Amino acid sequence: MAADQGGFAGDVTYVHDEHAPVFVISVAAQLAGMHAQTLRQYDRLGIVTPHRTRGGGRRYSSYDVTKLREVQRLSQDEGVSLAGISRIMALTDEIERLRHRVADLESQLARAAGLLGAGQRVFAAGRHGDVVAVRPGQRPRRAGDSQALMLWRPSR
């Protein structure tokens, strides 16, 4: 019964996607504590831009509603102008995008380090100035007059 998360036979586990456009403008306005006309104005100004249906209707996500609440807080509690709010929201979105990018790059770096066996190779200067990779604790072999670059990869 691993799939039965809600107590009903045949239930499927639901994963909430905060970016899924599910709310019509009236519902989003009610959830944000605003008038629908205010949401239309924010859309025109580019402060909070909802997804559009094929027919042109606005669909808001949970994330959009959270942003609308923050816009309202900045406007009413902090006294920030709409131009200022627009800039703050743009910078907030950029920070979020960059955080995701950093997480992706860290993941790629970890995978690459695992593939290359990072930290398991030691490089040394050979007798004639060439660079050689050796096992930790070993000295490079004398390779005559070679200028070759030697790499050591541990066996898996």
Image (cartoon, rainbow, N blue to C red):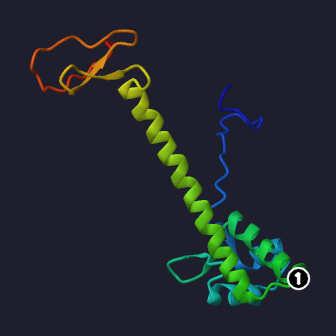
Q: Position of residue 138 (x, y in %)?
A: 34, 9
Dot 1, how many residues are within 10 Å of its Cα: few (below 14), some (14-19), or many (20+)?
Answer: few
Q: Is residue 27 visible in the rendered structure shown here?
A: no
Extreme residue toward the left, this view: 145
Mark 1 highlights which residue?
76
The residue type indicated by label 1 comes to Gln
Can you tell which quarter of the image residue 111 is in?
A: top left
Q: Closest to the observer: 76 or 37? A: 76
Q: Residue at image x 70%, y 88%?
A: 83
Q: Residue at image x 34%, y 13%?
A: 135
Q: Position of residue 50 (x, y in %)?
A: 62, 76
Q: Residue at image x 63%, y 72%?
A: 91
Quarter of the image with the N terminus in it: top right
Q: Closest to the observer: 61 or 120? A: 120
Q: Closest to the observer: 11 or 95? A: 95
Q: Position of residue 16 (x, y in %)?
A: 67, 51
127 versus 47 height, above or below? above
Q: Position of residue 52 (x, y in %)?
A: 55, 77
